[in-house]
């Protein structure tokens, strides 16, 4: 069967199975199996697919039709133009979170400084920032050892040596570790912020992601409020705290920041026009 025909058939199958991006899913998975990029597929669509690759592609499409996220099937995801390894131990980096990287870069006023990323997962935010700011010292922490290992592996693969990762329950290891210091110019986090009873948790890729990276107590606000309160002790005097949150949490995060004494508090919209980042 030609690559074009194979893609068409797979996209139809994924559409019937309820994928919101059937054609792209099929293209990404076929590119992955063939070890080519998607542009190559467009050029060589009339080629025949070799049998072994065909079988492998069919197996991936079957898994995708069951709902497994594409990023877990290929083991990678692009974020900020960087290829990041992903695993079921971490959240899959999302385009919305690139807005958080943009906001953090927008707060940079010196070629040197220190950034802390809390709940770093794949290391996406820390590594994207580090890739743009070679003079900064970047630290990413995560409570899961698997995430720390993955982020470290991503840093190595990207040859980013000024970002390092350590296992820490929020600030716990920083408080204990003299070498990391306690004063940061920028602290960022994309913490868990979804309420446990949110129906969104039963749809699409989130069903396969670690609950610990998604769900927070107090209707999704617990970790955001904790970070607002505790981060202050780890910020340089004119430092910035930037938090990603749910589309309906901006008011509460702004209020919490103002109550604790943060200044220049504002929210920024994601690509879908929802207030997604709040900073102060
Ligand atoms: N924005 C993600 C979602 O809605 C959740 C990310 C998070 O909880 N930090 O799927």
Image (cartoon, rainbow, N blue to C red):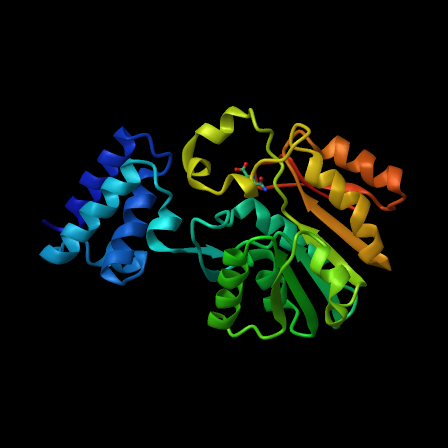
Compared across the picture, whether 64 is left or right of 47 comes to: right
**Residue placed furthest toward the front:** 176
Could you tell me which residue is drawn at 50 percent across and 24 percent down? 199
Residue at (29% x, 51% y) in the render: 29
Q: Left or right: 220 with respect to 4?
A: right
**Residue at (43% x, 30% y) in the render:** 203
Q: Position of residue 14 (x, y in %)?
A: 27, 36
Work out whether residue 228 or residue 2 is closer to the camera in this orientation and state it: 228
Q: Position of residue 8 (x, y in %)?
A: 20, 41
**Residue 77 percent location from the top left of the image:** 43, 54
Q: Residue at x 76, y 31 (%)?
A: 251
| Image vertical order of residue 196 relative to residue 69, above or below | above
**Residue situated in front as seen by the camera: 180 or 238:** 180
Q: Judge whether residue 276 can be spotted in this image.
A: yes
Q: Position of residue 215 (x, y in %)?
A: 58, 35
Most foreground residue, 226 or 113: 226
Which picture quadrant has residue 213? top right
Count of numbered tags: 0
Q: Quadrant of residue 41?
A: bottom left
Is residue 266 depicted above or below 114 in this figure? Answer: above
> In this view of the protein, which residue sits in the foreground, 231 or 17?
231
Ligand 1 falls in quadrant: top right
Task: Determine if residue 107 is in view.
Answer: no
């Amino acid at each position: 069967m030609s690559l074009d025909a194979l893609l068409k058939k797979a996209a139809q199958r994924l559409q019937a199975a309820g994928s919101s991006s059937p054609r792209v899913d099929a293209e990404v998975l076929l590119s992955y199996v063939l070890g080519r990029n998607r542009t190559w597929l467009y050029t060589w669509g009339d080629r025949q697919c070799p049998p072994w690759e065909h079988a492998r592609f069919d197996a991936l499409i079957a898994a995708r039709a069951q709902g497994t996220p594409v990023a877990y099937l290929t083991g990678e995801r692009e974020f900020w133009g960087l290829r990041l390894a992903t695993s079921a131990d971490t959240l899959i980096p999302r385009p919305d979170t690139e807005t958080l990287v943009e906001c953090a870069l927008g707060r940079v006023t010196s070629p040197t400084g220190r950034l802390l990323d809390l709940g770093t997962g794949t290391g996406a935010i820390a590594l994207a920032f580090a890739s743009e700011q070679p003079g900064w010292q970047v630290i990413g922490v995560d409570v899961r050892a698997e995430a720390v290992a993955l982020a470290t592996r991503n840093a190595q693969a990207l040859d980013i040596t000024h970002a390092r990762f350590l296992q820490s329950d929020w600030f716990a290891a920083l408080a204990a570790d003299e070498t990391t210091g306690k004063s940061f110019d920028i602290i960022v986090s994309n913490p868990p912020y979804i309420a446990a009873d949110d129906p969104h948790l039963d749809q699409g890729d989130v069903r396969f992601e670690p609950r610990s990276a998604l769900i927070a107590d107090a209707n999704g606000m617990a970790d955001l409020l904790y970070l607002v309160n505790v981060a202050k002790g780890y910020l340089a005097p004119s430092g910035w705290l930037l938090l990603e949150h749910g589309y309906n949490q901006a008011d509460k995060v702004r209020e919490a920041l103002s109550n604790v004494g943060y200044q220049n508090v504002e929210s920024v919209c994601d690509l879908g026009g929802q207030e997604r980042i709040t900073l102060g």
